[in-house]
Amino acid sequence: MEIIVSEEGARTVAALKGRLDTTTSPQLEQLSQELHDKGAVDLVVDMSGCDFVSSAGLRVIVAMQKRAVVEGSLVFRSVQDGVMDVFRMTGFDTILSFE
Amino acid sequence: MGSQGSGKRIDALSWRGALSDASRQVRSMAVALLAAAIVSLSFSQLGFFGVGEQGAYVTYAIVLLAPVALSSLLLGTVLGTLAGLLAGASLLVHSIVQPLDFYEIMFVTPVSSVVLFAVAGFLAGVLFALGLRRDPPVWRRCLIVVVACAALSWLFSFAFRMNVIYELVAQTLPGALSEGEAGGGDAGIVANGLGSFGWQVAIDAALMIVACLAADAAARWERATAGKRSLRTTFRLWLLGGALIAFMVTAGAGFAIVTEQEEASARESMLSESRYLCNQIDERLSRQSALDDAVAAGVIGDEGARALSESLSLDGLLDGYDVAVDGTVVVLAGDRIVLSDDPELPEGGLVSDHFDEESERMLADIAASGSIVQIMSSQAESSGVAGDDPIATQIMYLCAAQTGDHTVVIVRTSGMVFAERSGVMLWTTISAIVLLAVVSVLASVLLARIVGRRIDETNGALVRIEQGDLRTRVHVGGSREFASLSAGINATVDALEGWIAEANARIDRELAAAKTIQEAALPCTFPPFPDILRFDVYASMQPAREVGGDFYDFFLVGGADKGLLGFVIADVSGKSVPAALFMMAAKSHIRGYLEAGMELGEAIENANRKLCEGNGSGMFVTVFAGVLDYRTGRMRCVNAGHNPPFLWSGGAWRLVEERSGLPLGLFDGLPYAAFELSCEIGDELFLYTDGVTEAMDAQGRLFGVNRLKELLDAGFYLHPRSLIDLVRHDLAAFSEDAEQADDITMLALEFGVPPEVSATLVVRADDAELPRVNEFVHTELDRRLCPARAQNQLDIAIEELFVNVAHYAYPNATADDPGSVRISYTYSAEPPSITVELSDDGIPFDPLAKPDAAMPDDILDVPIGGLGILMAKNSVDEMAYERVDGMNVVTIVKRW
């Protein structure tokens, strides 16, 4: 999986490209930790290039969301249908913010 | 003690007694017995065992004969003769060294007696050899020994007597001729000294018989029990032997010392006694003469002189002497006995009435030197102390001293001299026996406690080990030796266990290798011909042991363009490797002939011929073979003694009961005619071996054809793979823990449908393997034009299930050995669907047993564990869990 980080005003955008699964989710976890440590707490995750999310990916998303609840914000952008199915199936669609 | 010669004479001469025995112990035993006999008989020669006053002749003449007889029995004829020679020689030396008188020299020394003993040894050897050469039963052995010993004793005593008489005559005749009557006395004395012939033979024989019987029994016992005696018996035996030798040595030494001391004190007392008497006689005689002078001079009156003379007379000198205590004390003067304490030698008697000329001369010599001599006597002078037996012969000590014309003679019997010796020796013997008994019992008890019990414990453990209980360990302590023995046994058992485990592992490996080879021989790629869409075939075989005798086969006959599918199912009689080898031959023959273009019946006939050739082990194989023309549905079949298969046709299962002949491999040249079945699209043939219908449950009930039929009815719509899976799972449920007795083999063939496609991949149970798993499934899904969304959903299910196994199934996994996961899929075209099976042999875990994770209301409550399984379940159409043969098997189905 590839992650491209860019600035969008005050927000930091992380564009995911590829599968967010057991093998790749640690990448996102590490990145979000780094961003949080740098103080970049307002995050946008661009999911347009991500076609697959497994429970390991969800785990990372939960961790990010927990941090965002305490400080900052987390928004998911352009979620593909297949991935949205997963969010719906697990109830994440009601918890996460989308744009 | 038998011998193996052919002729009697040679047998007797070459007979070697117990020495010829093969057992070294028996030979040592024979020599030891002989030594013990000689030592103990030497004791009797010393008079210790109470031959006593009954004549020293017994000790001289007899005791050497028993060892000679014993030598002949134990050592054989030649050595027996040699022993006789030695015995005779020892007598000769004895007589020369000792300053014996005429009688004794005559009694024991003649050179001819040396020859006699040797002859005795030879005779005894011959008698025993003749009697015992065939190893007769016990009672006859005893009888033979008794008779031989008695005969020997009689012969020997007779010869000895003749010898003595000859010597007597030879020596006394010239004397008798020259000196008249005087020699006749000698002859009488010597004749008396010979003693009773009957007693001599009896005592002699008894000694020999006891010694020989004991030795013979001991040698036989030794031979019979050598190596079989208990430790305790052996120990006791050695203890007894050692104690006996110690006892003999100490008793012998004690005996010699006591004898020496008593003899010395007797000499001293006799000498001082005689000196005292001489002095008294001198004094009295000189005073008497002084008195006589005084009387003659008139100094003393007659009255006073008479009174004085009485007090000075010799008459009262021996008052207070007792013949029983002091011995015979006599004073001789001239030819008269003037004083005596022995009523046998009355005072005033003539000396010549009691002593012959020779004795008188001897007495005079001894008196002149004032010394003591040891004499052997049977004369009248001893009769007073020797009891009434006139022929009694005994050793006596004689002391004589001379003063003036008076001679003082003191004679004491050996009984008087050694009065205390018997008492001392008796007490020594009793105390030694008591000591021996105490030590023996103590040693025996200690041995049993210290050694016996531990050996029994060790043996008990060894018996258990021998019976196959290799978990037995020996823990016998108490001493360094037993601890080391225990450790040694334990180490051996450990090593043995290791060896057995290794050997088992090797056999397992080899059988596993054989199984691999056999499995490789069976087509296992399904579908075998994915491009031919006119039939679907599936088959499976579960061997009962590592390798089985069942097989199945299918192949295209003569290439794809002919449109013919050949298929075979078969069951070889017997199991394991021989069955597997026969199976390989049967399989290759049938396929070979069919592929060569032969008609089915002809091919089977040829295969039968080949299998009959060199089938020495009498094996046979039941076969159902068929050729399907998958373009027309025409099917030709041959059933050679196999179970009738089921055919789904016209909406029902029916048994195909046509038969073509006997199983293959039984009789050469049998015809096998093929029969024809006509198949419509959707018709399905289900072939199986008797391992299916004869599978047993734990109670021993058979699965049976009826249950199979019901099962097939229930799964009538299933394609070959699913149908076989259905039967397989039902069989597993039916048999539960019962051991599979026979190979279970099935083959299903459906006509007119496209084949299911399946493949299998085995990967390490590691997250890093996920991309491989995905690629493996995607390749097929892409080929089957599976929509991306369905593919995505399947991906989720596979990933979640795989990760679940990788993380939890193998709690003891290491980086090197993470465990493995088998992933297999089956694609089915109608309707398009894929069935994926994930199996692992980790800890039992049913992912479906957990309740579904609740939908989270708050992100903080999201339960991550369990979410994956929920996702997996919701992503596919079907999901099931089974524990099969120690494997977790999760099956998911995704349709599109």
Image (spheres, coloured by chain):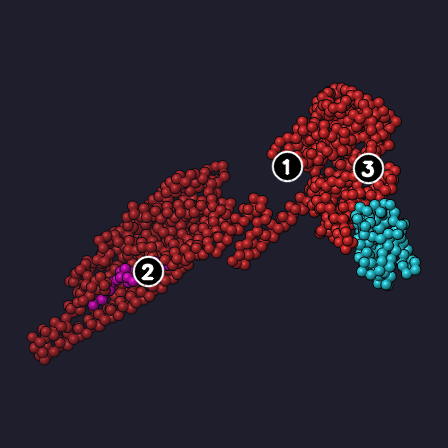
Chain colours: A cyan, B red
Tell me: A80 left or right of B491.
Answer: right
Residue ID at (70%, 38%):
B546
Residue for point 63% across, 34% down: B697
Q: Which residue is mark 3?
A: B895
Image: magenta residue range: B406-432
SS at mark 1 in the image: loop
Residue A96 shown left or right of residue B812 in the figure: right
Which chain contains the residue that carries disc 3?
A: B
Residue B476 image point, x, y percent:
53, 54
Q: Is residue B815 left or right of residue B25?
A: right
- Of discs 3 and 1, which sits in the foreground? 3
N-terminal of the two: label 3 or label 1? Answer: 1
Q: Which residue is mark 1?
A: B738
Prevailing SS of the magenta stretch? helix
Give how far across and how far down residue B589 sits, in percent. Answer: 77, 28
Q: Which residue carries the number 2 mark?
A: B427
Q: Kindly report which numbered mark, 2 or 3, lies closer to the viewer in this rendering.
A: 3
